[in-house]
Image: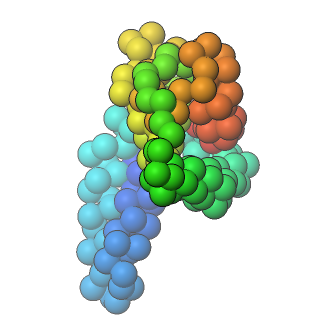
Amino acid sequence: MSRIIRAIPVAILTFIVYIVFTGSATHFDIVTGVIGAVIVGIVFGSVVITNTYKFLQLQRYFWGLAYALYYFFIAEVRAHYDVIKRILNPKMPINPGIVKIPIDVASDYSILAVANSITNTPGTVTVYVHPNKKYLYINWIDVVTREPEEARKAISYVFEKFAKKVFD
């Protein structure tokens, strides 16, 4: 029974992604989407889902939406603007370097969300996740501080706040 319960969230997410990427909701697409989603859910559900209770907590979905809105409409816009400013400036003011920042999230999904948010934001790239999962090494286009906690505030703090509410 536990395997079936763990398969449900994976199957739902797989079906949604399938329909979105096909861009179609014909009867054929729905039937093949359901069949494929059920298979993927059964095969990968017990690997992907460790705590089914989290899937049922609706506030996580609202925080996930808030995370997405913040990321796409605030963090991304600021980062793109900053990088464009640097590109268009004849002196190209950059001070690149790799900084070590502590992270305060618990689950692997939270760490992945924070690392991906950093990497997908122009001007920063996650180059290494420390094995104890408490530090990230970030290649930063303009290192304004090498002090780990200050760098964390500048790079990952907001992403961590959202990731905790969604995944931890």
Q: Is residue 66 above or below residue 28?
A: above
Measured as percent of width and height from the top left, residue 39 is found at: 26, 56
Give the residue drawn at x 47%, y 45%. Answer: 91
Where residue 159 sits, quadrant-wise, is top right
The residue lying at 28 percent from left, 67 percent from top is: 35
Residue occupying the far bottom of the picture: 26
Seen at 57% across and 50% down, the residue is 82
- Name the one closer to the observer, 141 or 164: 141
Q: Residue furthest top?
A: 132
Nearest to the observer: residue 118 or residue 32: 118
Q: Residue 51 location in percent, x, y? A: 53, 33
Displayed quadrant of residue 20: bottom left
Q: Residue at x 62, y 53 (%)?
A: 78
| Quarter of the image where the N terminus is located | top left
Residue 59 can be seen in this image: yes
Q: Is residue 65 above or below residue 18?
A: above
Residue 115 visible, this orientation: no
Residue 146 placement, left or right of 115: right
